Amino acid sequence: MLAFTHMATDAAAGAEIQLKPARTSMAAPRGPTGPPRLATVVDREKTCPLLLRVFTKIGGHHTVEDFAIRGKEPKDEVQIYTWRDATLRELTDLMKEVAPAARKRDARLSFAFVYPDRRGRNVIRNVGMTYVGSTSRRGDDHRTLAELSFQTGDFLDVAIYN
């Protein structure tokens, strides 16, 4: 279900960005194992939402170094309260409300999780792409945070391409 990506190099910063399909922890694997599971439905009336810290950037993703020092994350932060069953389309619609560049008809939004690996170093993992002006709902619109192995405390980095 997850698309595997490769190692990429940020030419401007000369830094290597690790793009991984899923991270593992000592306790249990984070990504899906075995046959696909049915999506869990969250009762949004009874379940407390989680805080999702979203960092936006026009033209590309932030680098790992931008998140290196806790408390000195990039300034372009949006805080969203949402649930694990939120889709990338829902997040795209929220981003359109706060980021004027995301409202353009030909805009594409690329989503990536930022989280610490087992050694405590941050990694960035691309998780999906949505197309703002698309009526056919192509891309990863239907994918949920839970399906993408989001864990509470992960950051969401959104690159806005026009």
Image: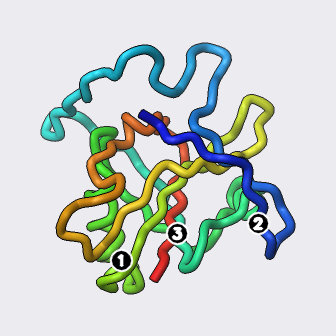
Name which of mark 3 and mark 2 comes first in the sequence.
Answer: 2
Q: Amino acid at mark 3?
A: Ala
Colour scheme shown: rainbow
Q: Residue at 38% of width from left, 78% of height from top?
A: 107
> Residue 88: image x %, image y %?
33, 54
Name which of mark 3 and mark 1 comes first in the sequence.
Answer: 1
> Of 79 and 85, which appears nearest the observer?
85
> Residue 78: image x %, image y %?
45, 67
Q: CA distance from mark 3 to mark 1?
A: 14 Å
Q: Is residue 55 above or below residue 35?
A: below
Q: Amino acid at mark 1?
A: Val
Q: Residues within 10 Å of mark 3 (few under 14, many from 20)?
A: many
Which labelled disc corresponds to residue 98?
1
Instruction: Mark 3 and mark 1 in contact? Answer it, CB < 8 Å.
Output: no
Could you tell whether 32 is left or right of 76 in the image?
Answer: left
Of the 4 image quadrants, the one containing the N terminus is top left
- The picture quadrant where one finds residue 43 is top left
Query: Mark 2 sits on what residue?
Result: 10
Q: CA distance from mark 3 to mark 2?
A: 14 Å
> Residue 15: image x %, image y %?
83, 61
Which labelled disc corresponds to residue 140?
none
Task: Name the front one of labels 1 and 2.
Answer: 2
Q: Is residue 151 above or below residue 113?
A: above
Q: CA distance from mark 1 to mark 2?
A: 27 Å
Q: Residue at 27% of width from left, 48% of height from top?
A: 142
Q: Residue at 64% of width from left, 22% of height from top?
A: 25
> Dot 2 lies on which element?
strand
> Residue 96: image x %, image y %?
31, 75
Q: Residue at 61% of width from left, 46% of height from top?
A: 5
Query: Mark 3 sits on what residue?
Result: 159
Could you tell me how many numbered marks the image carries? 3
> Of 136 and 152, which appears nearest the observer?
136
